[in-house]
Amino acid sequence: MDTSDESLAAAAARGDRDAFAMLLDRHYDRLFGLCWRLTGDRTEAEDLTQDICAALPAKLQSWRGEARFATWLYRVAVNAAHDRRRRAASRTHASLGWGAWEVNRKAANLEDATRRDWLNGAMAALPQDLRDTLALTMGEDLTQAEAAQVLGLSEGTIAWRISDVKKRLRALVQEEATE
Amino acid sequence: MTREPQDHLDRLTRALHEAEPVPDPEARRKAVSAAMEKFDEFHQGSADPARPNQDHLRMSAGFLKGVRRVFSTFTNKPVLAATTSTAALCLGLFVVMPQLQTRPPALSDHSITTDTVAPEQPATDTALTRQRESLANTLEANISTPRSAPSPAGQTMPANVTTSPEAAESQAVADMAAEEPAMNSAPTSNLRPPSLAERSESATGDFTIGFAPPSELIVAPQVSNTEAFANAAANPVKVAAEEPVSTFSADVDTASYAVVRSSLMAGALPPADAVRIEEMVNYFPYDYPAPDADGAPFRASISTMQTPWNPDTRLVRIGLQGRMPAMAERPPLNLVFLIDTSGSMQDANKLPLLKRSLRLMLDQLRPEDQVAIVTYAGSAGEVLAPTPASDSAAILSALERLDAGGSTAGAEGLEQAYRTAAAMAGNGEVSRIFLATDGDFNVGISDTDALTDFIARKRDEGAYLSVLGFGRGNLDDATMQALAQNGNGQAAYIDTLQEARKVLVDQLSGALFSIAGDVKIQVEWNPAEVAEYRLIGYETRALAREDFNNDKVDAGELGAGHTVTALYEVTAPDSPALLNDPLRYGADAGPAETAAELGFLRLRYKEPGETTSQLIETPIPSDSAATDDDARFAASIAGFGQLLTGGKYLGDWGWDEAIALASESRGEDAFGYRTEAVSLMRLAKALSGE
């Protein structure tokens, strides 16, 4: 299909049903992947993705085509994930995903950590802003500059955050080694 | 056995990719169909956005079905804020439908309600009404805080279910308002008893603002309006012989007026709880005589006039004028802006407006002033270290970089701001924090009491706090009030750049320099001259009589150049307007022979930094008649506020009289504030369907 995301989005915003369907079809999987990386929980990610999709018809009205559609979409997703998190946090102190794992981690025995547990531990050990940065940059199709655009930060900040992630990971590995 | 850092990142990346689940086809199908339904509904619903009224009529069953399906797909989990605009749109449309179709609430309406709020609702038509009522009662019963009962809408705003052109017009305005996400109407609208549904559609959505449904009932909190307003029942008429003393705290806040304006501009009458009459009256500058240069920091002017809405009573106006210190000698300012950069702040009337407002304010600062910026709930932390105002380039670029929608729930924003403020303040200097938010006070201390205590403690250490509210929909007016009152600051609501100019430029010195603290006002009425009295407004500022002399009890601050106006409506003993009959067995003490005195005014205040209050006493002469424009204009605004809240004491006096009185008493009106008030009154008149 040659039609660009951007022209599809513009058509969808004007009410073109097929264009909208095509746009959803193209982006659902990647959007779900991002939501999963943002939340760390499958069910959460499915709900979040669905909510974002359902919000798109209205949101598209404010799409001005100043950025790549995917960049814009990810920004919508990051904001949505952030709002959802805030709501979850204010509704109840129990949280899902990476955060809940952090709670469990304290009780769990790390000795026989599987790879999956290492991932959870590493993600949980990172502060939220670094996790979000990773969720975007670890995705297959965003450059650092685009991730910066999504998060509304400068490229330098993203680079700094990535190096911060590296630092923290190193510390984590060292901690593991000494345990 | 450490490896290269790059390896760790690679390892994490690989692990992330490997752990990433494959999208579940069923979830995908559900999401896509939910989105398509939403799409159809959206584009059907907004086919002719310029004439929403007509559209609503056209779409009946199909539309409702669509909405129902949309809501049922939302599940019971919170829908994210991203959906707010769409949700608000269809709810807005939905809310007005029962009235327009003039048929009993249909099953389909009900399903929507229950899908959103109470899934276990039965679906029979007869049970429906009962259920609705009981749920509404539950909601009402659960309204927390001593807020006044839901707006006495029945009195003020006659039902608007007519077909007159004017009603249709205000309907259209209301609908447009409903489309705006910030003004969204909550699904709780539908939970109200059917009798309420008969009321003005233009107000339906907005009336629910005052409701604070228990959180467990809000399954879609971002669709409902989470605004909370501080208010109390209107001051009643009191009998001077029984309760001769009236005590209250000065209030220089003006937030209520701006909230009222923003509601009206959006095409809806403000919720009655949002109307604090004294803040509306005090919004306007009045030209009272300035205090003597070496006397008290403010001066009281007293005058009386005939009450516009009642020829048999009089209005006593007490006007305080704060001193305007010589600005050339003012100490350097230490300002910390604590800015909410949560995702919801990205609307044009929030963060962007805030940036423009602060840019305006920067021009008012001196080179030796210092500015710092701390953010929370977004890109967290200190964004701008204390910077001299002369380095405007650095400040402006820091402002420019602020962006809503970061994703860190910054926990210690407020404490960080106070730390920065403490570091900035030189010896004996005062620093001030401006908290700018759209209502999310998730600033790290979750317990409101702990938060106000914290702010009060910091106030005593010399760091003051003012609150600037932006946007609508989530505005926590009650908390704003509480924070600013405890922080020796002002709570202002900024809805337009003009308002920003008023608060941050024209009246900046008042916002920044306190000239008198804990200003308390006490009036003792002389029963020989005044049989009944009523303080108009100041409900949230009432003080106990004994608190007047208690210097430990906090009260409002007066800033440089501020004016405070209080209006009493008083009734003479022989007036036909008396509302209370004399007591048959009342103690007839025989009032002291102090004729020609209506009462006695006592004022207490503290010089900045002092802990002991000073007392000013002055009689209220009965012959101080004044009909200056300021007094009449203040009276018209007090009437405006009362019309918005029920107008219990106004008799036949209505919008036309208020408009006429305000227009003829506009005076010079250098800033155009009063002219704007007159147009707001006209708007309110149209919206109230009169």
Image: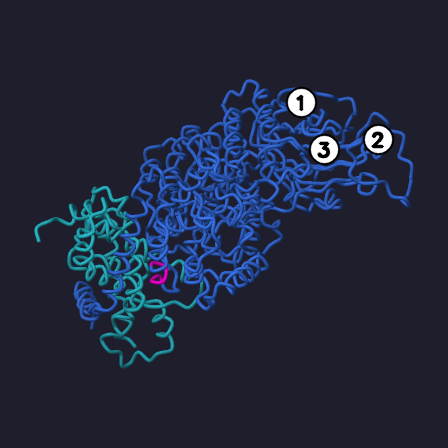
Chain A color in figure: cyan
Is residue B334 shown to the viewer in this render? no
Q: If the image is split into quadrants, where does the C terminus of chain B sit?
A: top right
Q: Amino acid at mark 1?
A: Asp
Circle 2 marks a residue in which chain?
A: B
Q: Which portion, as a residue range, is magenta?
A: B70-74
Q: Nearer the viewer, mark 2 or mark 3?
A: 2
The chain in blue: B
Tag 1 residue:
B292
Q: Residues within 10 Å of mark 2 (few under 14, many from 20)?
A: few
Q: B385 or B489: nearer the eye?
A: B489
Say which element carries label 2.
loop
Tell me the quarter of the picture where residue A28 sits: bottom left
Q: A85 or A12: nearer the eye?
A: A12
Q: Earlier in the sequence, mark 2 or mark 3?
A: 3
Q: A121 or B209: nearer the eye?
A: B209
Residue B30 coordinates in the image, percent (x, y) = 26, 64
Q: What's the CA distance linking mark 1 and mark 3?
A: 29 Å
Tag 3 residue:
B569
Q: What's the CA distance linking mark 2 and mark 3?
A: 15 Å
Q: Are marks 2 and 3 in contact (CB under 8 Å)?
A: no
